[in-house]
Amino acid sequence: MSLFTSPFDPAREAALVTGAGNGIGRAIAQALVGEGVRTVFADLHEDKVLAAIEAAPHPELAVPWIGDLAQRAACDALLAHAQQTVGQVTHFVHSASPPRREADHAMAVDEETWRQMHAVNLDAGFHLSRELARKLIAAQTPGSFLLLTSLHAGTPRNLPHYSTAKAGMAMLVKELAKSWGRYGIRVNALVPGAIAAGGFVADPALARHIPLGRLGQADDLAPMALAVLSHKISGYVTGASIVVDGGLSLTNWFAPPELD
């Protein structure tokens, strides 16, 4: 049997996806249930989560959870809900992130916007990963974690709260991959380019900077996400940052912000 026909083991594996109500998180969560994997769809907005589940290939395998991951209590509630509804989570995808505003450049971003961006991306990503890993290590069960970073983990974006949060996540992936590899827990990053999803509205003119000639869609990320999450396909891959950007990272397209 081809390994591509059964990349997951639904009888033993379950998933948790944050930011599953829209954009890339939604596409990955829907793809996971499409492969028969019981999946918690976690997001801040109930209407978006329910719509994502309704549109999923196997909605009966999807479990909704609504809450603000900027709050530690909400993270713990999500972990408890996942354990109760799908059992031990073996596959974790952290895609949740507050919306970005182009006006929040270095001279304008306020403290609360800065805090929220780091709390959801970096703090929640670390806390959820560590608590899930504790259970996997205790059970001697392998796991596969995927954190959504950004090209701007290494390239300025005129949004310092966003870029620094994603840069922190990029190093977190490497730290966790090195620490947990001995337990069979793989940790990788998926690095999107200009993806027209999740509230990001790109100028169509940006396509001229992309070698493949078009902006990306959330569905462009899902196949690669599944491949990296799958132990059967990527069982010897950890600590890696997989870029899915149509070649955009080969260019440098952002000008400095206007500060007046």
Image (cartoon, rainbow, N blue to C red):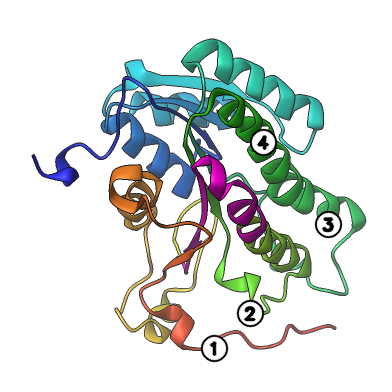
- Going from N to C along the chain, the mark reached first, 1 or 4, is 4
Q: On the rendered structure, is 208 left or right of 257?
A: left
Q: Where's residue 191, x and y in %?
A: 50, 64
The disc placed on residue 155 is 2
Nearest-to-viewer mark from 2 and 1: 2
Check residue 175 for magenta coloring.
Answer: yes
Q: Is residue 145 visible?
A: no
- Going from N to C along the chain, the mark reached first, 4 or 2, is 4
- Provide the residue designation for mark 1: 252
- Provide the residue designation for mark 3: 114
Nearest-to-viewer mark from 1 and 4: 4
Picture layout, residue 251 above or below residue 105: below
Local packing at callout 2 (Cα closer than 10 Å; few below 14, some 14-19, many 20+) is some
Check residue 178 for magenta coloring.
Answer: yes
* Residues shaded magenta: 174-194
Q: Where's residue 194, x and y in %?
A: 47, 68
The amino acid beneath tag 4 is Leu
Nearest-to-viewer mark from 4 and 2: 4
Q: Where's residue 143, x and y in %?
A: 48, 37
**CA distance separating discs 3 and 4:** 20 Å
Element marked by disc 4 = helix
- Going from N to C along the chain, the mark reached first, 2 or 3, is 3
Element marked by disc 2 = loop
- Provide the residue designation for mark 4: 128
- Going from N to C along the chain, the mark reached first, 2 or 1, is 2
Q: Nearer the viewer, residue 157 or 155?
A: 155
- Residue at (68%, 79%) from the top-left corner? 156
The amino acid beneath tag 3 is Trp
